[in-house]
Amino acid sequence: MSGVPFLDPDRLFPAEPHVRGLARELYEGVKDLPIVSPHGHTDPSWFAQDTAFADPASLFLTPDHYVLRMLHSAGISYDQLGVLRKDGTPVAEGREAWRLFCSHWHLFEGTPSKLWIEHSLEMFFGISEPLSAETADSIYDVIDAGLKTPALRPMAVLDRAGVEVIATTEFALDTLEHHRVLKEKGLIGRIRTTYRPDDVTDPELPGFAANLARFGEMTGEDTSRWDGMIRAHGVRRAFFREYGATATDHGVPSARTVDLVAHEKQALLDKALSGAIGTEEAGQFRAQMLTEMAALSAQDGMVMQLHAGVRRSTDPALLAEYGPNLGADIPCRTDFVDGLAPLLARFGNAEKFRLILFTLDESTYARELAPLAGYWPSVMIGPPWWFHDSPNGIRRYLDAVHETAGFHNLAGFNDDTRALLSIPARHDVWRREVCRFLAHLASEHRISHSHAREIAAYMCHGAARKAYNLK
Amino acid sequence: MSGVPFLDPDRLFPAEPHVRGLARELYEGVKDLPIVSPHGHTDPSWFAQDTAFADPASLFLTPDHYVLRMLHSAGISYDQLGVLRKDGTPVAEGREAWRLFCSHWHLFEGTPSKLWIEHSLEMFFGISEPLSAETADSIYDVIDAGLKTPALRPMAVLDRAGVEVIATTEFALDTLEHHRVLKEKGLIGRIRTTYRPDDVTDPELPGFAANLARFGEMTGEDTSRWDGMIRAHGVRRAFFREYGATATDHGVPSARTVDLVAHEKQALLDKALSGAIGTEEAGQFRAQMLTEMAALSAQDGMVMQLHAGVRRSTDPALLAEYGPNLGADIPCRTDFVDGLAPLLARFGNAEKFRLILFTLDESTYARELAPLAGYWPSVMIGPPWWFHDSPNGIRRYLDAVHETAGFHNLAGFNDDTRALLSIPARHDVWRREVCRFLAHLASEHRISHSHAREIAAYMCHGAARKAYNLK
Amino acid sequence: MSGVPFLDPDRLFPAEPHVRGLARELYEGVKDLPIVSPHGHTDPSWFAQDTAFADPASLFLTPDHYVLRMLHSAGISYDQLGVLRKDGTPVAEGREAWRLFCSHWHLFEGTPSKLWIEHSLEMFFGISEPLSAETADSIYDVIDAGLKTPALRPMAVLDRAGVEVIATTEFALDTLEHHRVLKEKGLIGRIRTTYRPDDVTDPELPGFAANLARFGEMTGEDTSRWDGMIRAHGVRRAFFREYGATATDHGVPSARTVDLVAHEKQALLDKALSGAIGTEEAGQFRAQMLTEMAALSAQDGMVMQLHAGVRRSTDPALLAEYGPNLGADIPCRTDFVDGLAPLLARFGNAEKFRLILFTLDESTYARELAPLAGYWPSVMIGPPWWFHDSPNGIRRYLDAVHETAGFHNLAGFNDDTRALLSIPARHDVWRREVCRFLAHLASEHRISHSHAREIAAYMCHGAARKAYNLK
């Protein structure tokens, strides 16, 4: 009768009875499809070691930057939330932080965090009462007890969630030690790494020169020479492919690319290694590296993912005291058209090249991404990313891209999360929203029911397999 | 049966019967809440003197830049509309202008002006027939007669509208003479001023040096020295607080801030006082002043409002002949992320600091404002501003901000108007749209009914009190 | 029962029964109104010669850049699609290309191309089965046979579609030979040219100097002098008006305008003629030419259309091998506020001046275009353009512009197409969407039914006649 907060079977579906009926029907056809998670940030050690998670707070609270930032916006300090300080000063312990979190649960009304967390709690722990100051302790205890059971071990979670394939993300210098274990266990294929070389492509990163030296050691290439550095990437990419990688990933402040001649590239590298590179030249270095990565993808067929347009760590105090990735990253305007022009002019039509574009600037969906994907054979649009990975975010995305790009230039869904237990919840939100969207199209006689069913299945399963070359 | 143009009890509610029912129910709970109007441009002399308004045209037509610009866009001159010329050349008299306005009422179909004006006419004058060439005179007479009655005196209007608190806006050099009268009458608290120091923070304003000199006289500070100038602000802010001010307001062409060292600041001030400041340096001056205002707010706890991103007086002929604020102000793209970085790096986490951001660039809602408000404890998002203070504008706003910022980082509603009689109409539109939005969330099982009721009340009353520290 | 893919009488109408009923009722009142097509790219030789179209592929496939780009995005080459190569290398013949097109019809699910093509096939050929590999040949044969009948001759198509007025677009150097024939046949008025002088206003165009020389010969003016060049435009504009032109059209990468003094203008022209003009100066040249065109419009009353904000031919290989206008044009951010400031400061209030603005940057609808049109008497907003000329594109447009600009600052609809048979389909989509939108407003009691009917008729017929001065 009253809107049930937890897992109503019709949640996210439109109220109009006919469209709701269509959405339900479409959802029936996709809700149990296996999960393909081709881009995310789960920890490979979980799957390699398959040991129990420590406690509720370190599972649901401290690693979730969506949750941390919202509580911080209400004036709660990271200390009170139990986020470890760089200098080791003591912070709140788990249960204490958990209570604070639960007593501020009202801040999350209307946010996707609420949907994801409540879904996780009900699905994995059978919890169906709302978080609150009153329920904090009892829910903590239920979760804590659950985490000690075999059903909550990482591999059991993958099984329960129906995860067919999941990709983790590792930096170029990562030894892939956990993936080696996974290989021995025969799990590569279901679990895969992704090559994310930001540690050796961004000269503004602390320790960049040391990273490049290490990169040279690992690969036997002279990484003080541009050509050697590029060959080193080739070596590492091949190594990552042995552990299931079909894709690379690149996190950059802008979508700028350039296509320089050899001596200009070497000059940039020399400056970068000297540590005296300026802001503009560092930008050129990253821009050239994107073009180089496209060149390598056009050769080895690895799918290139571009996550562009975010100012990282915008709170210097937070960065200094606690570190990065805690909620102070803010999107910015992004120009894909001028930015990618040099790269696409060279590789846009290359047969083996594929480039998946992710944006935090929704104004680019209809203006830039859909026209680019609707022309270039190599370009696809990634799903809504980060701040926009939410019911209304998905609605705006589908609304803005589908008419110009069609459905076949979309890359399906990514959960892009480090929160393992939220994976089924996130895919469920996507599936419901896709079905809702297609139900509207069908109710307006813009697609037939049978096409709606086909597209729903494609968008919830096949598209991701195809986009990421998962055979 | 046919859509009634005036005040249908279900206006703005969605057609789908279930959602409409939910919206109605939520609206029942908020429609009679007192009005909190923490930012606006009503004239304090109205309340201090409480005398009758002059005539219909000077109440509904000549002060309303929404109405003037629309009639001008149809080729009607400001002379014909009775807007006074700087040089005193005669213009149309009130009734003549009113007839012209009424005979062009069809231009306003679909605009918020129509909603506001028809609501005002019915609520305060019992008028329920549409404006037209035919009805112009009779409606003029009804309004004119009404204005002579005690029920239409300014304080009676506040009572009738249920205004609990209303803030006016005065420049730093204002003597607050009307607020002194209000203080004697015991009305400060219900009526409050706001500190808007644009007259002494924008060196491109004509008479800036003279303004700063006057600012020094009023405060006993040496405003030719940067430190003295800042102390002068401190003095004036304290003076404004005596007349109820809890907030400051800053109207700037961009959200740019800088954080310069002392000698750079003094050099800017020297140039500004010499009258030889260039465009770029004037921008730096304004940018530094925002940072200074944040520093003062972090000390004295006044809430800082930022209205950024508008090109003022874009028609030079209009400005020369009639003056500013007549409809030729046009929004422009605004960059809050890079713009506010210096200010937030210093004061974003300061305990007593609060910054309410207003934008005319809707592309910043989801990309910039919601992520900023969803991280920084000091930052809140103001309601849709000016061109976007309309049913569809409110829909786009709530859609874009709520998932990342939640509801508790929103500042409730501002009417931001100088049109006194439109205040209840504007708040009513907000209330209806909030209820509509929450009804949709509840119908999709994203929030419970009881939470919807709580959030509705908060968004229509509590949020503004909290955001503006109105105790 | 199941969603019928072809021409369901309720297509595009909302599912909610009451609103659908209102939309249907409004649509009944506008569906048979004559078509006014004041801006488009049909070939005037079709109407002058009135001969049969060649074959299905050259009618539906190779001239349609929406279709070509989508097939290219799926990895199909322009050779396979039968697009002629500059060097004459053979490409696929029509039937072969048609089969490929039909077998990839699923790519167009959800796109406006599907709506337009299916509408055309049913309306003009009685085809109501979907395109597919299986139906490719039989449908090809039906179309091919139909094209040989008198009913498919260009003038018969105009009659069948109820086209009251249609404008073609010719460059300044065009001889208007086909329009001369049309004049002899008494068809000028129903068929009109439009003055699009991009060939002599863009100094970055290959052959620009030769074009200007030819421009001088055609007009008897010295086009090596700025004043002579402007007079030459005046001569050509008058010539175009003899063939029914009421409008000019300007395709530019940005909305930038400048207002330079005489010697600066001559210096730009000298550089342009020398062939040594740089990128920045070429931009200034185009920017000044927009201001000059506004000056001429303010004199001769021709309506100035501005299509701004697109990067043309972004695939250099495509341009080199096949040419322009084949799908590799990508929108970019556009700044109308600063861009148009110099032009509007001079001519914005000029009595005979009218400027219709088109954008591919939807973020400008509410932020820039609606405020500009809602103030300046000369400015109107053109309908959604190109990538946004689609059901959801129209929804976003009406949502974003109507509250600030009202309906009377909108220019009605343009089909802007070279695909003759799609014209009724495109106008039908607009009409359905306008009725849908107004039905929503009426269902929310924001406009009355009678006003909704009036506005629907205006938006579907009268607005275009008024905006383009079609008497």
Image: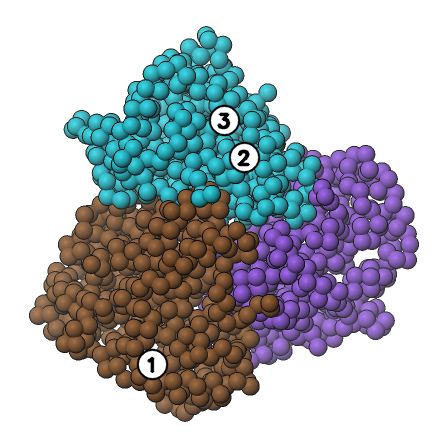
Chain colours: A cyan, B brown, C purple
Q: Which residue is nearer to you in this view: B466 or C123? A: B466
Left or right: where C3 falls relative to A201: right
Q: Which mark is residue C287?
A: none
Distance, label 2 to label 3, CA atoms, is 13 Å
Depth check, mark 2 against mark 1: the one in front is 1
Depth check, mark 2 against mark 3: the one in front is 2
| Residue C384 coordinates in the image, percent (x, y) | 60, 58
Quarter residue B242 falls in: bottom left
Provide the chain ID for the residue under circle 1.
Answer: B
> In terms of secondary structure, where does tag 3 sit?
strand
Q: Amino acid at mark 1?
A: Leu
Quarter residue B334 falls in: bottom left
Q: Amino acid at mark 3?
A: Ser
Please report contact status of discs 1 and 3: CB closer than 8 Å, yes or no.
Answer: no
Q: Amino acid at mark 2?
A: Arg
| Residue A396 coordinates in the image, percent (x, y) | 51, 46
Say whether mark 3 and mark 1 are on the same chain.
no
Q: Which residue is nearer to you in this view: A249 or B224? A: A249
Q: Say whether disc 2 or disc 3 marks the residue closer to the N-terminus.
A: 3
Is disc 3 surrounded by few (<14), some (14 to 19) or many (20+) residues within 10 Å?
many
Depth check, mark 1 against mark 3: the one in front is 1
Q: Which residue is nearer to you in this view: A237 or B277? A: A237
Left or right: where C432 falls relative to A7: right
Residue A283 seen in the current view:
yes
